[in-house]
Every structure is written in structure tokens, then in C-alpha cells.
Image: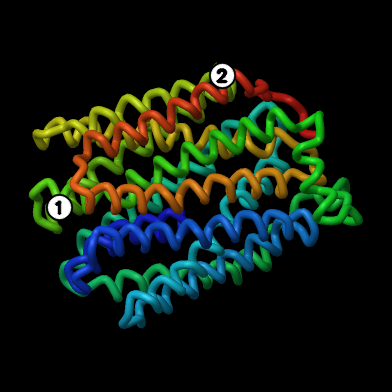
């Protein structure tokens, strides 16, 4: 929830900064992309660290890092200082997300593991809703700096976690802490895991590339289509509400229909919704397509976070999930930049969202052709 609040608030702050600092489309794209550069570094580095020192320790480190850096970014007066702090925010966020899903997947029985991890991820929708509410009620009256100061508050949650959160028993008992980083990385492409690893890398890249390209630009897209800043924030808030049923339906289906079915179906729905949103002209069509985009995309995210840790044994689980997430974050770097550069070059939203549709369809094919069903399998 706190992660999503931080990422979500950024999409609204980009729109507000564009007005305050007179930013170009390319500069707006860089704000989203530097966040993803940090997430790529964080997912890779903290994923490896979690297989060495434990899930709980890394979870707390990343929480403090992204909260404090987000609060400090409220004090910036230049784009460069803002970009540096957003890199640090991204590093914390990128590390925390795969480590959290790994910790939970190792703490739940096989028969309900997928459902519980998707429900964990559903709190992302809650965070986006909080971000949208802050944007709607705080930014117009008090400015974007106050909104960012609010996002520093989760750092205090680390005090509670330190005292009350148990580490993964599976990690404590079974992790091979004597394996070097190089050995862990080599194992990801060993014959036993190669096909799964390639599948995860393709899906993560496609999902993150399209998600950050589309969702970080949503408020700005609405502004560029002629709606006022405050109205745009309100419309995006309504679209965001569709994330919750997207998650809950995926959580209900994942133990019944399986990981492959849920992930591929929800990704396909995302691709069609992206195409519809990019070509929508009326407000009603924009809202309906945007709601379906939220529904399917976030359901797919939940399934992906449940599916990823199940591909590897305990000794390389956080490493495998972290590296896959890092590959995805590389896509998150290019998504917002692509939108900014294509808008600057004069391309319309129909063409831009068609590119995201194509990327997601590649992800669908990789799940169908390369994916292994892991429903209710015991973790090694």
C-alpha cells in the first residue's frame, strides 16, 4: 500500500510539476524513468541481499529508504535534485516489492499461497487510491510538496516491523548462505530453471514497460486531452477504483483456474483495454476503457507476483524474483520516455497505446508457450 502510494503520487506530481516548473514532455518522461532506473538497481541488489541476510532485514531497509527519500524530495527546488532523490525512492521500492512477495509466499501453505500473495498485492490498489485522494484534496490547495511530505510517514512503520514481523522460517532453515552471488545468478540460467527464467524476464519487461508508460501518464493524458488538472485527478481516481475488483477476481481465480490462465487472460484483457483507451475520444469511452485497463492490468500484476517466487527453490528465490523484477524495471525506464518522445514528435495516443498493446501480447505468448503451472505445488 505504501509502495503504491509513493508510485501513484508521482503520476499526479508529474502533472503538477509540469505546470510549476514548465517541464517539457521529455523532462516529464525522465521523472518516471529515473524512478524505474532506481527500481531496477534496487530489485537486483536487494533481491540478492535478501537471499544472504534474510527477507525481514531487507524489507525494513527498503521501507526506510523509499520513505525518507520521498519526504526529502519535497524540499527540492531543481529538476536534477528531484531526479536524484526519485532514483533513491525507486531503489527502495524496487527492492521491497519482490522481497515482500517472497517473504509471504514462504510463510503460507501451498493450497492458499497464490490467493494470499495476490491479496497482498491488492493493497497496491489501496495505495493508488490514497495517492489519488491526496492528489485531489491536497495538491490543489496545499501544493505537491505537502503531498510528498505525507509519503515520508511510512518510515515510522519500520519500528513496528522490527518488533513484530517474523522472518521466513523457510529461509532460516533452508537457504544456502554459503553460495556466492555469482553462483546464484548462474543457477537462474541452469538447464532446470532456464525456460522459467526467460519466461519471467519477458513477462516482467512487457508488464512494467506498459504499466509505467501508461499509468504514470494517465493524469497527464487527461490534461492533454483537454480536461483541467483537478478534473483529470478526479477522473483518474474513478478509473483507479477498478483496480480492487481486478485484484480480488484474480485472487479468487488463481487457486481455481491456475497461474497461467489468470496471468495470460488478464494480460490479454490489458492489451485490448490499452488499444481502446488510446483511441477513445469521448469522456465516457475514456472512463470505461481506463477502468478496464486498471481492472485487468492490476489483476495481472497480482498473478505475476504470486507466480514469480514459485519458479525457484529457497536458496535463489529472492534472487530470481529480484532479477526478473529488475529486468522489468528496465522496461519501466523506457515506457515513460517513449511516451514523452513520441508526444514530442507529434504522434497520437492511438499509436502510443498500440505499442503497449503489442508489448503485452508478447508477454501473453511467453506465458502460454514457456510457462509452467505451479498451482498448489510445494515450494522446494
Q: Residue 235, which numbered label?
A: none
Q: Is residue 371 above or below residue 135?
A: above
Q: Nearer the viewer, residue 310 or 353?
A: 353
Q: Residue furthest right?
A: 178
Judge left or right: residue 121 versus residue 317.
left
User: Residue 367: horizontal and vertical position, in percent?
Assistant: 57, 24
Q: Residue furthest front?
A: 345
Q: Disc 2 designates what residue? A: 368
- Residue drawn at 40 percent across, 40 percent down: 210
- The number of numbered badges drawn on the structure is 2
Q: Nearer the viewer, residue 5 or 27?
A: 27
The part of the image, by quadrant, that contains residue 258 is top right
> Sequence-wise, which precedes: disc 1 or disc 2?
1
Judge left or right: residue 336 versus residue 139.
right
- Residue drawn at 36 percent across, 30 percent down: 357
The part of the image, by quadrant, that contains residue 196 is top right
The part of the image, by quadrant, that contains residue 277 is top left
User: Residue 190: horizontal and vertical position, in percent?
Assistant: 81, 35
SS at mark 1?
Answer: helix
Judge left or right: residue 50 versus residue 280.
right
Judge left or right: residue 187 versus residue 73.
right
Q: Is residue 262 above or below residue 208?
A: above
Q: Residue 223, which numbered label?
A: 1
Answer whether residue 252 is visible to the viewer in this image.
Answer: no
- Residue drawn at 70 percent across, 64 percent down: 57
Q: Is residue 202 above or below residue 131?
A: above
Distance of mark 1 from mark 2, alpha carbons? 37 Å
Q: Residues within 10 Å of mark 2 (few under 14, many from 20)?
A: some
User: Residue 144: horizontal and vertical position, in percent?
Assistant: 26, 71
> Where, quadrant-wise, is the C terminus in this rendering?
top right
Q: How is the image coloured?
A: rainbow
SS at mark 2?
Answer: helix
Amino acid at each position: 500500500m505504501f509502495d503504491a502510494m509513493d508510485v501513484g503520487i508521482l503520476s499526479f506530481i508529474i502533472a503538477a510539476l509540469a505546470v510549476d516548473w514548465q517541464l517539457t514532455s521529455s523532462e516529464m518522461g525522465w521523472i518516471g524513468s529515473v524512478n524505474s532506473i532506481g527500481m531496477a538497481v534496487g530489485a537486483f541488489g536487494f533481491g540478492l541481499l535478501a537471499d544472504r541476510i534474510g527477507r525481514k532485514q531487507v524489507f525494513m531497509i527498503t521501507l526506510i529508504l523509499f520513505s525518507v527519500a520521498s519526504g526529502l524530495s519535497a524540499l527540492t527546488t531543481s529538476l536534477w535534485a528531484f531526479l536524484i532523490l526519485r532514483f533513491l525512492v525507486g531503489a527502495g521500492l524496487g527492492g521491497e516489492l519482490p522481497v515482500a512477495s517472497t517473504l509471504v509466499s514462504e510463510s503460507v501453505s501451498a493450497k492458499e499461497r497464490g490467493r494470499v500473495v495476490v491479496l497482498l498485492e491488492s493493497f497496491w490498489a489501496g495505495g493508488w487510491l490514497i495517492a489519488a485522494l491526496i492528489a485531489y484534496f491536497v495538491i490543489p490547495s496545499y501544493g505537491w510538496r505537502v503531498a510528498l511530505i505525507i509519503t515520508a510517514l511510512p518510515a515510522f512503520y519500520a519500528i513496528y516491523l522490527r518488533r513484530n514481523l517474523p522472518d521466513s522460517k523457510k529461509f532460516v532453515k533452508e537457504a544456502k548462505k554459503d553460495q556466492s552471488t555469482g553462483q546464484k545468478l548462474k543457477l537462474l540460467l541452469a538447464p532446470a530453471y532456464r525456460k522459467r527464467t526467460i519466461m519471467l524476464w519477458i513477462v516482467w519487461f512487457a508488464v512494467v514497460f506498459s504499466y509505467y508508460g501508461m499509468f504514470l501518464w494517465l493524469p497527464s493524458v487527461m490534461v492533454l486531452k483537454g480536461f483541467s488538472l483537478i478534473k483529470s485527478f478526479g477522473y483518474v481516481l474513478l478509473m483507479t477504483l477498478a483496480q480492487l475488483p481486478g485484484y480480488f477476481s484474480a485472487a479468487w481465480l488463481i487457486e481455481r483456474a491456475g497461474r497461467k490462465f489468470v496471468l495470460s487472460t488478464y494480460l490479454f484483457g490489458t492489451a485490448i483495454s490499452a488499444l481502446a483507451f488510446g483511441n477513445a475520444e469521448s469522456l465516457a469511452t475514456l472512463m470505461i476503457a481506463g477502468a478496464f485497463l486498471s481492472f485487468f492490468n492490476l489483476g495481472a500484476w497480482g498473478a505475476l507476483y504470486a507466480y514469480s517466487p514459485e519458479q525457484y527453490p529457497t536458496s535463489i528465490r529472492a534472487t530470481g524474483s529480484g532479477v526478473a523484477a529488475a529486468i522489468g524495471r528496465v522496461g519501466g525506464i523506457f515506457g515513460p520516455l517513449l511516451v514523452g518522445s513520441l508526444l514530442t514528435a507529434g504522434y497520437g495516443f492511438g499509436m502510443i497505446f498500440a505499442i503497449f498493446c503489442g508489448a503485452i501480447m508478447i508477454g501473453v505468448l511467453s506465458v502460454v508457450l514457456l510457462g509452467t503451472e505451479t498451482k498448489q505445488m510445494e515450494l522446494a
